Image (cartoon, rainbow, N blue to C red):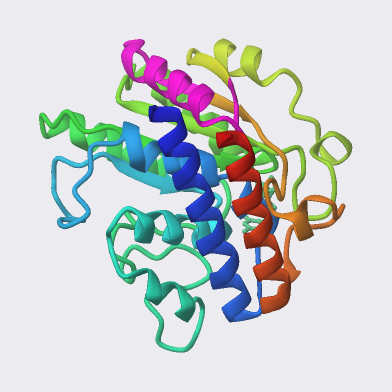
Amino acid sequence: MEADRLTGAAAEIRKLTIRAMAAAGYGHIGGSMSVCEVLAVLYGAVMRIDPARPDWEERDRLVLSKGHCGPALYAALAHYGYFDPALLLTLNANGTLLPSHCDRLKTPGVDLSTGSLGQGVSLGLGAALGCRMKGLSSRAYVIVGDGELQEGQVWEGVQFAAHRNLDNFTLVVDANKRQLDGYVEDICRGFDLERKFGAFGLAALEADGQDCGSILEALTKAKECGRPAAVILDTEKGQGCCFAETVPFNHYMNISSEMAEEACREIDRKLAEVRR
Ligand SMILES: Cc1ncc(C[n+]2csc(CCOP(=O)(O)OP(=O)(O)O)c2C)c(N)n1
């Protein structure tokens, strides 16, 4: 089944991400874990891509606006064949092709450079509009964090998407409830995101961000709805990683190889359990 294949891919992406961070000794683990499922679904079932031709003009584009979670994107790209997974162990090392934040000039498959929160929506809209102007049927996907929604630029962009009816644009919100130093609810509440995106003129959809089947269904609806869309994913910061999901402040952690191996064993165990 498609959902089972994608669940397996998400587990592989999660393990590759954790091991890459352990090789570096540290990383933005919390927010990287909460995008493993959506990356598995986007690259494995939704986006039109050709890993052998990362610059193919007719490809769909992905902007990981929460660019600090680059390691999860690199793991997804490696898993789906853009480059050798062995490269992941050079994460953030001197001269690496895989810097901690996404850089389109360095990494095969990274479409746009990110790291400064709030800017990725504009980049994705530029890609969506540019493709439309060129007569390409390519789509643009942008992944933002729920803390990142506090950046006003996101909402300027969303309004523009609605104004131009950019139906080839999908915004994915990783609603993991936490930002760098606490809960979004305590720092600056996002209120009802579905109603908010709806009021800005987007088709607003919700999905369980830990369930590949639910994500696939929402992204498919977004693609077919004929309007720009926002897919709000209910996720948990650190999800699926035993040493991170139980820690209140898991935005950025030091990670040893022992921690990583234990987490990978746990991921395998849980996957075997759901498949039983
Ligand atoms: C403009 C900007 N301000 C501050 C930062 C530093 N920063 C990096 S990650 C982060 C928290 C982001 O929270 P959220 O968007 O919820 O991401 P997640 O929790 O999914 O990692 C901050 C403040 C930044 N990268 N860019």
Say whether residue 148 is left or right of residue 6. Answer: right
Q: Assess whether residue 263 is covered by the magenta stretch.
A: no
Residue at horizontal 45 percent and vertical 19 percent from the top: 217
Instruction: Give the residue furthest to the left.
Output: 135
On the picture, is 255 further left or further right than 76?
right
In terms of depth relative to the viewer, which is nearer, 106 or 197?
A: 106
Q: Residue at x 32, y 53 (%)?
A: 80
Left or right: 141 in relation to 174: left
Which residue is painted at 56% across and 51% down in the image? 66
Between residue 186 and residue 8, name the one nearer to us.
8
Res. 115 in view: no
Q: Is residue 141 visible?
A: yes
Residue occupying the point 64% across, 12% down: 195
- Residue 231, horizontal then vertical, whole percent: 52, 24
Residue 104 drawn at (x, y percent): 33, 62
Magenta residues?
207-230
Q: Quadrant of residue 196?
A: top right
- Between 160 and 265, the one lying in front of the other is 265
Reply above or below: 60 against 155: below
Where's residue 63, x and y in %? 41, 47
Q: Quadrant of residue 170?
A: top left
Q: Quadrant of residue 25?
A: bottom right
User: On the rendered image, what quadrant is the C terminus found in?
Assistant: top right
Q: Does 6 appear above or below 108?
A: above
